[in-house]
Image (cartoon, rainbow, N blue to C red):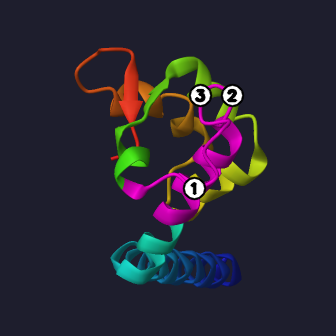
Amino acid sequence: ALFNVIVAIYVENTVAAAKAQEMDQRRERLTNLDMFRNRAQQLVNFVLDETRGSLHLMDADQVSYEKAMQLDITSEVFQSLLQHEEFQQMFRDLDIADEEQHDLFDTLDVDGGGTIDLE
């Protein structure tokens, strides 16, 4: 019985230490501004690359940052983007869990207009 108590305490302490370390790593990732900027730029580039046809950008080789920020993305376009593992991974890197990604469009569409922009 004593051995079981010792093992239980050891396991509990190990799990607590792992959770604390995970939280520290997550906090560091979320406060790393360079990492956030890099992931945000990757998201914008991915959206532009994958939606050129549906956003009527076929003729534009280079889309300016200002023009990209004004593009409207519908729920259908967003859901099609979520079919790409790379897109999902970018959200995971920003600590947006898989189960939250499918509801993310509704969260970002704060005015309920049915579209979101990259800004």
Q: Amino acid at mark 1?
A: Gln
> Is there a contact, CB below 8 Å, between mark 1 and mark 3?
no
The residue pinned by badge 2 equals: 80
Q: Is any part of residue 28 visible from this angle?
A: no
- The residue at 44%/55% (across/down) is 64
Which circle marks residue 56 in the picture? 3
Q: Left or right: where does residue 24 sit relative to residue 97? A: left
Q: Nearer the viewer, residue 3 or 19?
A: 19
- Mark 1, other Cα within 10 Å: few <14 / some 14–19 / many ≥20: few
- Three-letter residue code for mark 2: Ser
Q: Which residues are magenta?
A: 40-65
For disc 1, the marked residue is: 62
The residue lying at 50 percent from left, 73 percent from top is: 38
Q: Nearer the viewer, residue 117 or 62?
A: 62
Residue 45 sits above or below residue 22 on the image: above
> Residue 3: x and y, percent?
69, 84
Residue drawn at (60%, 25%), measured in percent from left and top? 77
Sequence-first disc among 3 and 2: 3
Q: Quadrant of residue 80?
A: top right
The quadrant where residue 55 appears: top right
- Does 93 appear above or below 74? below
Q: CA distance from mark 3 to mark 2?
A: 16 Å
Q: Secondary structure at mark 3?
A: loop
Relative horizontal placement of residue 81, taking residue 22 as reference (left or right): right
Could you say where residue 37 lies in the image, as x and y percent from the top left?
A: 42, 72
